[in-house]
Image: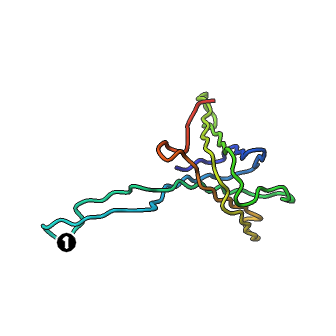
């Protein structure tokens, strides 16, 4: 899932100028089985996967108050379609920050990338979608 130009909060932190938020679901464990009729997979499943979130945004000034890896809080993304009357949508999940990285270049300026893993009770999807 890709969200362009969202408003983002992580606990008490508000991140301005986020260019995009990408939610990925990657397998932690896969199961594949082969049948007796040929060399191709006859069954596949992904019983366990993790949901990760990557925020990429531009940094325009000093960036001293940033959360540190290991911090856990509710992360909220709010987005709306530009130029429409549709209601805004909010994605929220409890997340743990995994990393904070900076990329400096003449072309892009300073870009910050924050990587999170979403936390769940183990059964429900960690992200909830609501209209605000």
Q: Identify which residue is drawn at 66% across, 45% down.
A: 75
Residue under the point 78% across and 47% down: 13
x, y (%) of residue 120? 55, 46
Q: Which residue is mark 1?
A: 39
Between 115 and 94, the residue placed more toward the observer is: 94
Figure check: 117 above or below 40: above
Q: Position of residue 105 (x, y in %)?
A: 75, 71
Image point (77%, 64%), residue name: 110
Q: Residue furthest front?
A: 121
Residue 36 is left or right of residue 75, and the answer is left
Q: How far across and down, in percent of the image, does residue 87 sit?
A: 60, 29
- Up the image or down, 111 lies above or below 91; here it is below
Coloration mode: rainbow
Identity of the residue drawn at 59% across and 30% down: 131
The front one of 24 and 87 is: 24
Whole-percent x, y for residue 74 in the image: 67, 44
How packed mark 1 is, by other alpha carbons closer than 10 Å (few <14, some 14-19, many 20 or more), is few
């Amino acid at each position: 899932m890709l969200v362009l130009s969202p408003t983002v909060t992580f606990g008490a932190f508000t991140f301005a100028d986020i260019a995009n938020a990408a939610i990925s679901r990657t397998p932690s464990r896969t199961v594949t089985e082969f049948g007796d009729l040929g060399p191709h997979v006859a069954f596949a499943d992904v019983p366990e996967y993790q949901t990760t979130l990557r925020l990429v945004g531009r940094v325009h000034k000093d960036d001293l108050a940033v959360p540190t890896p290991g911090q856990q809080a509710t992360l909220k993304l709010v987005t709306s379609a530009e130029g429409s009357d549709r209601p805004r949508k909010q994605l929220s999940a409890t997340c743990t920050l995994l990393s904070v990285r900076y990329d400096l270049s003449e072309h892009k300026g300073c870009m910050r990338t924050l990587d999170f893993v979403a936390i769940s009770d183990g059964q429900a999807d960690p992200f909830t979608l609501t209209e605000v």
